[in-house]
Amino acid sequence: MALTQILIIILGFGGIILSIVFAVLLFYKMDKIKLLEQAVAKLKTSLNEMDEQAKLIVRTDMELNKAQEELDKKIVGLYALQRLSRSLSMTLEENLIFKMIDTSVIEELGFEKACCFLFDESLNQFVLQLNIGYSREEIEGIKKRVASDSSRYLDLIKEESTTSSISLTTDPAFREKMSLVFRVASFIASPLLPKEGSKGFFFAGTLSRETLISEGDEELITILANQLGQALENARLFEKTWRAHQELEKKVEERTRELSQALEEVKMISRRKTDFVSSVAHELRTPLTSIKGYAAILLSEKLGPLPPPLKERLEKINRHSDDLAQFVNYLLDISRIESGRVSMEQEPQDLKSIVEEAADLLSEIIKEKQIDFSYSVPVDAQSVYVDRGQIKRVLINLIDNAIKFTPKDGKITVSCSSADHEVRVDVQDSGYGIPEASIDKIFEEFYRVDNPINQEVKGTGLGLALVKNIIEAHKGKIWVKSKLGNGSTFSFTLPKPIQ
C-alpha cells in the first residue's frame, strides 16, 4: 500500500515535471515559431520591395528604350531636315522646291503619307504642290474635299500654329474629319507662311494606329514647314528682284536709246547751228570788209577834205566795224573749234612768258585804271603742253574781263599752281562779282549778266564761250567762283608736257 502510494506520488511528481518540461518545450517552440514568422514577414516585405524595384526597373527600361527610340527617330529626322535644308537653300525656283521632298525624306521623318497645298488667290482655291504615298484616285478625292471645306483650311493657316491628331487644342470633330479626308490613323498639319505670295499647309500622316506620333514629330514637321515657307519666300523675292532687274534693264535700254537719239539730235542741231553761224559770219565778213575799207578811204581824205561832223561819224563807223569784226571772228573761232576744224597745235610752252605777254598787251589799260596787277608762276607750274596762241587768247580775255569789271584802284592777281598731271591757273579780281543765279550760265554763248555794270561795259557774250571751248579742246576744265561785292575767280587747268 505504501509502495503504491509512493509510486503514485512519484508518478505525480514525474507528471508534473514532464508537464513542466512539455510547457518549457512548447514555450520555446512558440518563441521559435514567432521568430520564424517575423523572419518570414521580413522576407516577404523584402520580396515585395524587390518586386516593386524590379517593376520600376522594367518600367524605367521601357521608358528609356522608348526615349532612345524617340531620340533616334528625331536624330534621323533632323539629319533628313538638314540635308533637305541644304538643298532648299540652293534652290531659287519655286517650281523646284517641292520636288526636293521625296518618299525617303518622309519615311525618315517617320511618316508614310504626305501632301502639300498652296492657296491661289487668283483662282480662289487650294492647289496641290506635293503628293507622297497617295494614288491618283485618293489624291483627287482629297483635293475635292479640301476644296469643299477650304474655309476651314484657310482658318488653319490663319491660326499660324501646327495641328495634329494628338493636339488638345484642335477641334476633335475636325481631327476626326482630317483623318478621314487624308485616310490616315494619325497626322500632323503645319501652315506654310511665306511673307510674299500665296500661303498653304503641309500634311504628314501614318497608316497604323500602333505608330503613335509625338510632340517631337510635331516639332520636326513644324521645322520642315518653316523651311518650306522660307524657301518659298526666298524664291519669290528672287523672282521679284529678277523681274525688277529685268524691268530696270529694259527701262535703262529704252532710256539709253532715247538719250542716244536725243544726243544725236542735239549733235545734229549743234552742227547745223555751227554751220549756220560759220556761214553767217563768213557772209558778214565780205560787206564788213567793204564798209571798213570805204570808211578808211574816206577818213584818209584822199577823195577830198571832210567836214568835222562827217569825219566824226566815219570814225564811229570805223570803230564799230572793228567791234563787229571782232564779233565775227569770235563766232568763226567758236564754230571752228566746236566742229573740230581747228586743232590745237600743242607743244611744250613756258606759261610764265605767256602770262607776261598777255599782261604786257593789256598794261596800258591796267595803268589807266590804276589797277594793282600781279602774277605768280612757280617753277613747277611753268611748263605746260598747249597751243601758245590759243592760251594767250584765253589769258587776254580773262584779264580783260577782270579789268572791265574791277573798279579804279582795284586788284587783279594771276596765280598758277602745279598738280599731278596739270597746272591750275586762277585769275582773281576785286570787282563787282557775279550773281549766284548767273554762275552756271556765264560760259554760254551770247549770255551776259543782267546788271547795271554790264549795261555800261560793251561786250558780245562770246568771249567766255570761246575761252571755254579753247580750254576744253586742251582737255582741261574751267570754272568760276564769285560772290556779289567780293569779286570773282576764274580758274582753269592745262596739261603738262608728256614725260
Image (cartoon, helix red, strand yellow):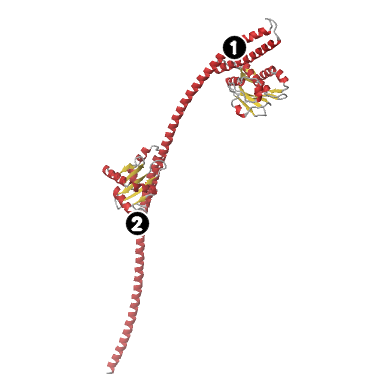
Per the image, label 2 sits on a secondary structure element best described as helix
Which disc number belongs to residue 62?
2
Q: In the image, what residue occupies the spot 45% across and 30% down? A: 251
Q: Quadrant of the N terminus?
A: bottom left
- Relative height, residue 17 to residue 57 (above, below): below
Residue 15 visible? The answer is yes
Residue 264: horizontal and vertical position, in percent?
A: 49, 21
Amino acid carrying mark 2 in the image: Met
3D distance between C-alphas at marks 1 and 2: 117 Å
Q: Position of residue 273 (x, y in %)?
A: 53, 18
Q: Is residue 162 above or below residue 288?
A: below
Can the viewer see residue 76?
no
Q: In this view, does 335 lie to the left or right of 414?
A: left
Q: Say whether residue 461 is left or right of residue 267.
A: right
Instruction: Pick whichever, 209 or 345, lies toward us.
Output: 345
* Residue of label 1: 285
Q: Nearer the viewer, residue 243 or 52?
A: 243
Tell me the amino acid under the disc marked 1: Arg
For this orientation, the residue located farthest to the bottom is 1
Dividing the picture into quadrants, the one containing residue 80 is: top left
Q: Where is residue 303 in the image (x, y as percent from the top left)?
A: 67, 4
Q: Would you call the spot at circle 1 few (<14 residues within 10 Å), some (14-19), or many (20 or more)? A: some
Q: Position of residue 266 (x, y in %)?
A: 51, 22
